[in-house]
Amino acid sequence: MTEEEKKLNESDLSEEKDTETGPGKRNKFLKIGKIFLLIGVIVAQGIAAYAIIKNNYPDIKETIDGLSEKGGVYYKVDNIIINPAHSDGERYLILSLAFEMNNSNDVATADKMSVEIIDRVNSHLIQKSAIELSSIEQREVIKEELKNEVNDLLEKKAVRNLFITKYVIQ
């Protein structure tokens, strides 16, 4: 064989080896790439979860602590009298409420702030018309609004639920 034939045979053999190892290497690289991508996604999710928990920890802790006491404790406000908006004093609402609180500390705080709570409830409801106050569909909305008002006043999510124990509109 001449030297040129030997070189051609050697180059053919080296090309065959490259083609055999080339796709194998590529498949191996893709497998490793997928593993690193999966690890990257898991790490990113862990970092995002940590950031969310870190930013919202006080709210999460309050919620968890509040759920630990079953049945809750109640703070009652009796006989709030309200003149609805645009009624010219001819209509009134007598209202009694019971707030289901997270724990007894929240009830003690609400008891100390009873005047502010009654004022906040009164200020909110005098803006409603007699038609809004007498609408049964609006009661759930009013309950949620009052719950949010008291939670804002107490500066935490102390109220789990609000119950209307008396609701008389004339």
Image (cartoon, rainbow, N blue to C red):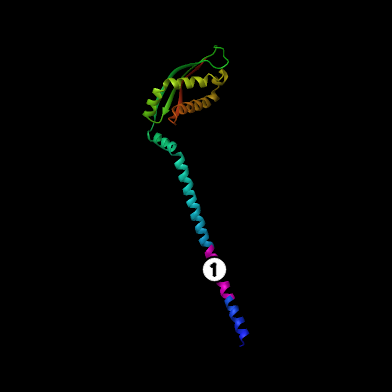
Q: Is residue 102 left or right of residue 5?
A: left
Give the image quarter of residue 23: bottom right
Number of disc labels: 1
Q: Is residue 21 on the magenta stretch?
A: yes
- Within 10 Å of disc 1 (Cα), the crowding (few <14, some 14-19, many 20+) is few
For residue 80, above or below residue 50: above
Q: Please tell me whether residue 109 is drawn above or below residue 13 in the rendered image.
A: above
Question: Magenta part of the protein: which range?
Answer: 15-29
Q: Amino acid at mark 1?
A: Gly
Residue shown at the point (43%, 35%) measured from the top left: 63
Decide whether the magenta segment is chiefly helix, strand or loop. helix
Residue 150 x/y as whole percent: 46, 26
User: In the picture, which quadrant includes the N terminus?
Assistant: bottom right
Residue 107 magenta: no
Instruction: Kindly identify the residue that appears in the image at 58 percent across and 78 percent down.
Output: 13
Locate residue 152, reporting x and y percent: 47, 28
Furthest residue in direction bottom, as rendered = 1
Mark 1 sits on what residue? Answer: 24
x%, y% of residue 44?
49, 50
